[in-house]
Image (spheres, grey):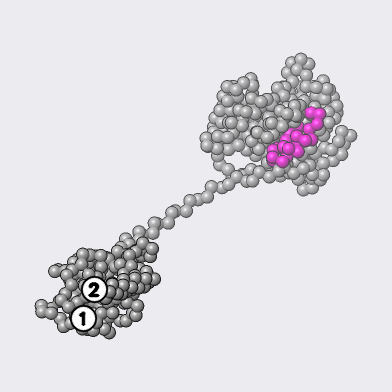
């Protein structure tokens, strides 16, 4: 009995020491290979049962190549320990391979290469006379064929499109430059103030203060003069800002402070004219003011009054023979009185616009008579109708000059809307200076 107790004590001591050594080594770092997770095959005769349980049996037929999944590394704390030897040694140096059996089978792979480092250590501890263990060949995935070059699959490039025919560029309208301020070389002093005059070499205000225009333009031309500016600063300001820059602006000589309005009109490149208070029909019911040119006055007095009117604004291209709705019909009925006014304007380098539709062109001054008055009466529908009529005249004759006798909000609104679509209808708006004609009585050199 005493000997039996000592034996069991020794057994327990050995087991405890082995367990302690295994717990210190821990589980393999790379986990158990997928090839060792299969059911164990019966151990061969004379071999170690532990090694037989680790090696998978050789399959009857080699399986189809399947890519081996990645083997996860399991946590050491949850993996059961494996019995390993403490001294690692290469398996091939200790276990000789057995001769190939008949029929010939695929060569057995090195078990040490299939197992983790801890597993190969336990196999290396087998005695030298242990026979070789047949192991199934590893499953190796066939290498994937290289992808076909992309360039080989690309379709042939399309031919280059033929070059587009070069279009003839349409001439651009000239840039709207500001009107120059009054040039001292084109002015002379008088008892009423500075008056326009001809400069050296026949230089005139008509050219110096004209709105730029392309003389090669072939479309029908339409010009418009708006009168009676300067009496209402707010209404005149709106007209200067909203009307087309080619519009001519006739300022009343009775405007109290015209200079700020003149500066704004010049900044937009708009031509300016002086409105002449000529004696109208039904005078004195229709009164053109205390500086009006009358048929009952002597020529010298009318000349002095004309000088006062022309001195009221500077940088004008000419004069309009109307003041608001009064168009000087009684004064214009006397050819000598009207001719004297035209002579003075021509000698000072100014043009003259006759406000009477159908009247002949000025005989003794550069200028033109209007073809239509567009604001009689000044209603929305009537203004639209007369502007359309002005277009018709321009298409028939090549050009047309319209007059808006009195500036008003409805007039500014309708003219701005009409001019916005004028180019789409095949016409072009031009300044007054683009339509003037040579005086009939002026001899040609």
Judged left or right of residue 94, residue 242 is right
Question: Residue 192 location in percent, x, y?
Answer: 87, 33
Residue position marked by numbered label 2 in the rendering? 51
Whole-percent x, y for residue 17 in the image: 35, 73
Label 2 Cα neighbours within 10 Å, binned few <14 / some 14-19 / many ≥20:
some
- Which residue occupies 29% across, 74% down? 6
Query: Residue lying furthest left in this view?
Result: 103
Q: Residue placed farthest to the front in the image? A: 1
Give yes or no for contact between labels 1 and 2 (Cβ–Cβ under 8 Å).
yes
Nearer-the-camera pick, 76 or 12: 12
Q: Is residue 411 magenta?
A: no
Q: Is residue 40 visible?
A: yes
Q: Quadrant of the N terminus?
A: bottom left
Could you tell me which quadrant the C terminus lies in? top right
Residue 114, quarter of picture? bottom left
At 75% across and 17% down in the image, what residue appears? 286
Up-down relation of residue 217 to residue 37 (above or below)? above
Above-or-below relation of 380 to 178: above
- What is the magenta range? 255-274
Q: Which residue is labeled 1 in the image?
A: 130
């Amino acid at each position: 009995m005493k000997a039996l107790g000592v034996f069991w004590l020794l057994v327990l001591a050995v087991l405890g020491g082995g367990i302690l050594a295994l717990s210190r080594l821990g589980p393999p770092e790379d986990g158990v290979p997928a090839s060792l997770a299969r059911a164990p095959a019966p151990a061969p005769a004379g071999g170690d049962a532990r090694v037989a349980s680790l090696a998978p049996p050789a399959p009857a037929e080699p399986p189809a190549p399947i890519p081996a999944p990645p083997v996860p590394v399991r946590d050491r704390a949850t993996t059961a320990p494996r019995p390993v030897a403490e001294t690692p040694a290469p398996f091939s140096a200790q276990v000789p391979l057995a001769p190939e059996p008949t029929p010939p089978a695929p060569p057995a792979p090195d078990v040490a290469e299939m197992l983790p480092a801890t597993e190969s250590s336990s196999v290396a501890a087998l005695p030298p006379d242990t026979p070789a263990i047949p192991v199934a060949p590893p499953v190796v995935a066939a290498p994937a064929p290289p992808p076909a070059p992309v360039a080989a699959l690309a379709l042939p490039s399309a031919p280059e499109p033929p070059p587009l025919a070069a279009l003839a560029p349409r001439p651009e309208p000239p840039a709207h430059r500001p009107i120059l301020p009054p040039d001292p070389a084109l002015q002379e002093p008088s008892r009423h103030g500075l008056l326009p005059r001809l400069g050296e070499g026949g230089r005139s205000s008509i050219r110096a203060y004209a709105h730029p225009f392309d003389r090669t333009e072939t479309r029908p031309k339409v010009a418009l003069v708006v009168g009676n500016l300067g009496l209402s600063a707010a209404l005149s300001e709106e007209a200067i800002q909203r009307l087309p820059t080619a519009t001519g602006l006739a300022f009343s000589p009775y405007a109290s402070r015209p200079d700020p309005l003149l500066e704004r009109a010049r900044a937009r490149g708009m031509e300016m004219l002086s409105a002449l208070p000529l004696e109208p029909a039904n005078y004195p019911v229709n009164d053109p003011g205390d500086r009006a040119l009358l048929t009952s006055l002597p020529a010298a007095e009318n000349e002095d009054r004309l000088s006062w009117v022309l001195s009221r604004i500077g940088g004008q291209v000419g004069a309009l023979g109307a003041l608001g709705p009064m168009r000087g019909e009684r004064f214009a009925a006397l050819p000598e009185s009207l001719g004297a006014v035209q002579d003075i304007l021509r000698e000072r380098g100014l043009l003259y616009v006759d406000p009477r539709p159908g009247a002949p062109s000025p005989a003794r001054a550069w200028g033109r008579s209007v073809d239509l008055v567009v604001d009689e009466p000044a209603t929305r529908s009537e203004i639209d109708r007369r502007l359309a009529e002005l277009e018709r005249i321009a298409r028939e004759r090549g050009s047309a000059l319209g007059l808006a006798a009195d500036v008003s909000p409805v007039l500014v609104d309708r003219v701005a809307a009409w001019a916005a679509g004028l180019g789409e209808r095949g016409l072009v708006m031009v300044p007054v200076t683009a339509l003037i004609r040579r005086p009939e009585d002026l001899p040609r050199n």
